[in-house]
Image (tube, rainbow, N blue to C red):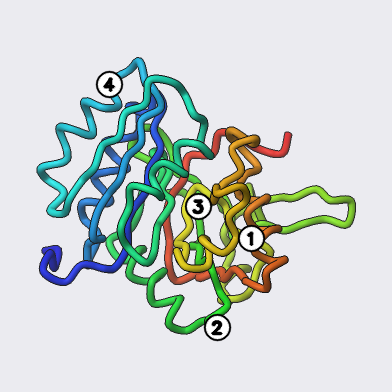
Amino acid sequence: MNDVANPLPISVLMVTWNSSRTLASSLGSLAAAEPPPAELVVVDNDSTDDSTRVVGALSAAMGFPVKLVTQTTNLGFAGGMNRAIEASTQPFVFLMNPDLRLLPDTLARLHQGFSMADEQVYAVGPKLLRGVGRELAESETLDSTGIVMTRDGRHFDRGGGEPDMGQYEAAETVFGLTGAAVLLRREHLDRGRVAGQVFDEDFCAFREDVDLAWRMLGLGFGARYEPSAIAYHERRVTPS
């Protein structure tokens, strides 16, 4: 049972847009987190499906406060996540896609990763494997073990599409981490804002996580991959 009396100092942040297909599985996994987060903030980008209804229906079962912020226009991931950050209260924020399924200890292991990392670390991310179908079922295919940059300036999710053969089992520094699932330290994010924004809203959706990684690296902050934390993500955007 979740230790509601001693939650992790984490605000879970989610942006939805017609996300009802996988949303129940995603939120169901969050409800089982041990210990639970302190709160969940959902920003809905003017969905036309049942996304807001699903959030409302599951809120009572969460065991921690749930804030639902509805927009009348689609602000994209960057704009929606910025609104979620401003509505949150905790020193750590966990970006959680609505097509992401956690294990009960995922958040706890990510939070523990900060305690084992240098104070200059702004982000800790899990080993992501591909989630299958609306239930986001387990697979043995890697989705991301951190973002890597190539010499020609392209970026890729390390290990994406590879079978998980134990090749990424070392906790280590990486260039950046995908915005689908990452725990961030608020005080460092605040120092890296551009025009007052954590995520540059000119990106709207996609690549905003890489832009953040560049900015934070320039400030001397690093990102850490923590393979003991595992989650499952339905991959919809690939390099191809």
Position above or below: 36 against 220: above
Q: Residues within 10 Å of mark 1 (few under 14, many from 20)?
A: many
Sequence-wise first label, 1 or 3: 3
Whole-Å distance between the Cαs marked 4 and 2? 42 Å
Badge number at residue 147 = none
Label 4 packing within 10 angstroms: few (<14), some (14-19), many (20+): some
Q: Are marks 1 and 3 in contact (CB under 8 Å)?
A: no
> Amino acid under label 4?
Asp
- At mark 4, the secondary structure is loop
Which mark lies nearer to you, 1 or 3? 1
Q: Which mark is residue 50?
A: 4
Can you identify the residue that label 2 sits on? 118
Q: Give me the residue at 67% from left, 73% from top.
A: 220
Q: Earlier in the sequence, mark 3 or mark 4?
A: 4
Looking at the picture, tell me which residue is in the foreground, 155 or 66.
Answer: 66
Q: Quadrant of residue 118?
A: bottom right
Query: Mark 3 packing: few (<14 Cα in 10 Å), some, or many (20+)?
Result: many
Q: Of residues 104 and 165, which is closer to you in this image?
A: 104
Quadrant of the image occupied by residue 120? bottom right
In this rendering, is residue 220 above or below 53? Answer: below
> Whole-percent x and y of residue 194?
62, 51
Between marks 2 and 3 in the image, the one whose residue lies nearer the viewer? 2
- Expressed as whole percent of the image width and height from the top left, the position of residue 199 reads 56, 46
